[in-house]
Image (cartoon, grey):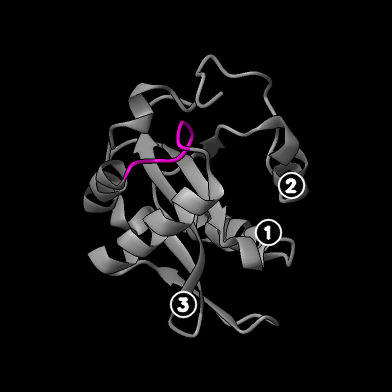
Amino acid sequence: MTTPLNLVFRCLCSISEVHIAHGLESACYSSDEGASLETMLYRYKHAQHLFLGAFNGQTLVGYIMATQASGPLVTHKSMSTHDPLGTTVCIHSVCVSPQWQRQGVASMLLKKYTEMMQDRKGIRRLAMLSRMDLVPLYQRNGYKCLGPSNVTHGK
């Protein structure tokens, strides 16, 4: 899929792309919020099909990273495991390179990701944790805020 910004959306297809994604993760999230490289590599190894990247040419400018879980919400357990039979896709990161932010990349990623997941057999819902300041972004893209989470992540 190519967009007006000349972005192409595709799954990440190598460990080196996960390393690049981790660089974006570090640029977008504080150290207590962002996933470690080890965590990202685990998620990639077990749920590669749940990593979607936005590319400008060969450059990764944003991505979504997720795993699957059996329960309906993101939990502490779902942040560190992957249940291939789970019916909930737990989105752990929606990350856009700082120089590409506020250009609609996150919205395009979310829309493409939602479309991809609608086509996947057995997936019933998408769930995520969000900072309050980002809730309007997710709501504009069809997500519903269910209120405060029992999971505390970051400060």
**Spatial separation of the CA atoms under disc 3 and disc 2:** 24 Å
- Within 10 Å of the Cα at label 2, are there few (<14), some (14-19), or many (20+) other Cα atoms? some
**Spatial separation of the CA atoms under disc 2 and disc 1:** 7 Å
Q: Is residue 122 left or right of residue 3?
A: left
**In the rendered structure, which segment of residues is drawn in magenta?**
31-36
Please tell me which residue is depicted at 53% across the width and 36% down the height of the picture.
127
Residue 51 seen from this side: no
Q: Is residue 35 magenta?
A: yes
Residue 19 seen from this side: yes
Q: Secondary structure at mark 1?
A: helix
Q: Is residue 135 magenta?
A: no
Report how many numbered discs are placed on residues in the image: 3
Q: Are marks 2 and 1 in contact (CB under 8 Å)?
A: yes
In the figure, 41 relative to 126: above or below?
Answer: below
Q: Is residue 13 left or right of residue 22?
A: left
- Residue type at numbered disc 1: Ser
Residue 2 x %, y %:
59, 82
Q: Which residue bears the numbered disc 1?
A: 107
- Residue type at numbered disc 2: Leu
* Residue reaching furthest to the top: 150
Q: Which residue bears the numbered disc 2?
A: 137
Q: Nearer the viewer, mark 3 or mark 1?
A: 3
Q: Secondary structure at mark 2?
A: helix
Q: Which residue bears the numbered disc 3?
A: 59
- Within 10 Å of the Cα at label 3, are there few (<14), some (14-19), or many (20+) other Cα atoms? few
Please tell me which residue is depicted at 69% across the width and 20% down the height of the picture.
147
